[in-house]
Image (cartoon, rainbow, N blue to C red):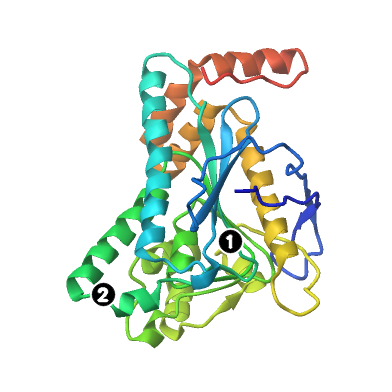
Amino acid sequence: MRPPRLPNLLTHIAPRSPSLPIHHNQPHYLSQRLLSSTTPPSSLLFTTHTIPAPHLGHIKILSLNNPRSRNAISRALLEELGREIRTVRDEWEGDEKRRSGGGVVGAGTRVLVLASQIDGVFCAGADLKERKGMSSEETTTFLTTLRSTFSLLSALPIPTISAVSSVALGGGLELALATTLRIFAPTATVGLPETRLGIIPGAGGTYRLKTLIGEAKATEMILTGRRVAGAEAYNLGICERLLDLPPPVDGKPGVREREAVLEAAIGLATEICEGGPGSVGAALRAVRGGKEEVENREYDTVVGMEDRDEALRAFGEKRRAVFRGR
């Protein structure tokens, strides 16, 4: 399967408030050669590519690719997504064993990017046509798998980024909420419309959205089921970065927006990977732990690493550090 065409664009981060006309330029990294395509040729649901990360390891791009169902979350898609996430988790479980033994960490996937291969949609939510034909037992099994898969994604020991340029509704937004960070294009449209279908968000939408934007704002979005465009989503705090792009000619998100948001996500992933593999992982665990004792413990895990000594040498010699994951 051919890799997606990756543009040579310069992306911008839009200001959170329109009254602050400040743009931060983001360097582009998509001219780098794609290392490999690891998706089996028979797969119709995902494309997977890797790009070399600074120092060591790689950035993995996982793009949903099922135009017939608008990337709706079916049992087959969920199975493939779970398999990809478990592969990354298993890589890092091996890294933890190597780290405890003084070996190299960060030689595998260092950041996971979730994107869409389809111009008009990131993920349309649950596959309602498939859901309609499920028995109650099958529905329960599906929901259990969906929740555990999103929880596994949210608990990965590496940063994860969602790149959204178009529609992410219901389970599609819940998928994006399960990643560490989110980058939106202005053409993104997100929402949790489940109350209008006689249900509620059932895969983390209520508590993950509340954590991001606060109880009152999350309650308003969920109770009304309304859709939120990219700029408002950024101002609410649903996404961390918003691209500054001119409106599409026909008003609909297209290939330009999809490729630009993917480029920005890879740029952010590359920025993250400029840090030491051990220190990025420790910082992520410390923030998630949210307690002084967790920060102290994680600091102790990196202060004795060779990468820390290399950083001090590089500072004294006025050069860039070369981290080796030790």
Residue at 63 percent across and 73 percent down: it is: 232
Q: In the rendering, at what x and y percent does residue 103 appear?
A: 44, 15
Determine the image quadrant of residue 246: bottom right
Q: In the rendering, at what x and y percent does residue 44 appear?
A: 50, 58
Q: Is residue 163 above or below residue 159?
A: below
Amino acid type of the residue that numbered disc 2 sits on in the rendered structure: Met
Q: Is residue 194 left or right of residue 41?
A: left
Residue at 41 percent across and 26 percent down: it is: 95
Q: Is residue 14 above or below residue 56?
A: below
Callout 2: helix, strand or loop? loop
Residue contact at pointers 2 and 1, CB within 8 angstroms: no
Amino acid type of the residue that numbered disc 1 sits on in the rendered structure: Cys
| Residue topped by disc 2 | 134
Check disc 1: other Cα within 10 Å, few if <14, some if 14-19, many if 20+: many
Q: Earlier in the sequence, mark 2 or mark 1?
A: 2
Front residue (pair 303, 157): 157
Q: In the rendering, at what x and y percent does residue 68 appear?
A: 52, 71
Callout 1: helix, strand or loop? loop
Q: Is residue 19 above or below residue 311?
A: below
